[in-house]
Amino acid sequence: MHTVAIHEAKTHLSRLLMECLQGETVIIKKGQTPIAKLVALPSAKSKRMLGGAKGVVSYIADDFDSPIDDFAEYEQ
């Protein structure tokens, strides 16, 4: 949650709305007094979909899951 002045809210309304859709709450203040709270409606939040990135990864190296030499000292 963060606070913005009225002028900033008017100037950056689209950005603030996107933040709300990602779960952020924005408080709008006039001077030092909070006057409004901007939150997304539950129906406006996009639903998570399993498998939504299918086909995005086009290549995985053969040694993808090999131990990294830099972390050898942390192995147990």
Image (cartoon, grey):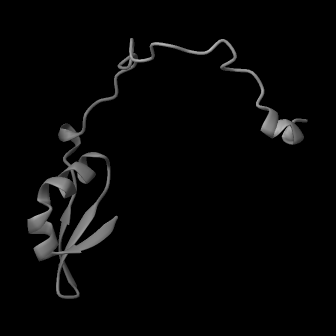
**Residue 69's spot in the image, x, y percent?**
81, 33
* Residue at x 20%, y 57% (from the top left corner): 16
* Residue at x 13%, y 59% (from the top left corner): 13
- Taking the view exactly as shown, the residue that stands out farthest to the left is 10
**Residue 63's spot in the image, x, y percent?**
70, 16
**Residue 22's spot in the image, x, y percent?**
30, 46
Taking the image as shown, residue 48 lies to the left or right of residue 62, namely left
* Residue at x 8%, y 67% (from the top left corner): 10
Q: In this view, does 52 lie above or below 35?
A: above
Taking the image as shown, residue 21 lies to the left or right of residue 7, namely right
* Residue at x 22%, y 49% (from the top left corner): 18
Q: Quadrant of residue 45?
A: top left
**Quadrant containing the N terminus in the rendered view:** bottom left
**Quadrant containing the C terminus in the rendered view:** top right
Q: Is residue 58 above or below residue 8?
A: above
Taking the image as shown, residue 51 lies to the left or right of residue 67, namely left
- How many numbered marks does the figure carry? 0
Q: In which quarter of the image is residue 27?
A: bottom left
Q: Is residue 59 above or below residue 35?
A: above
Q: In this view, does 13 lie above or below 6?
A: above
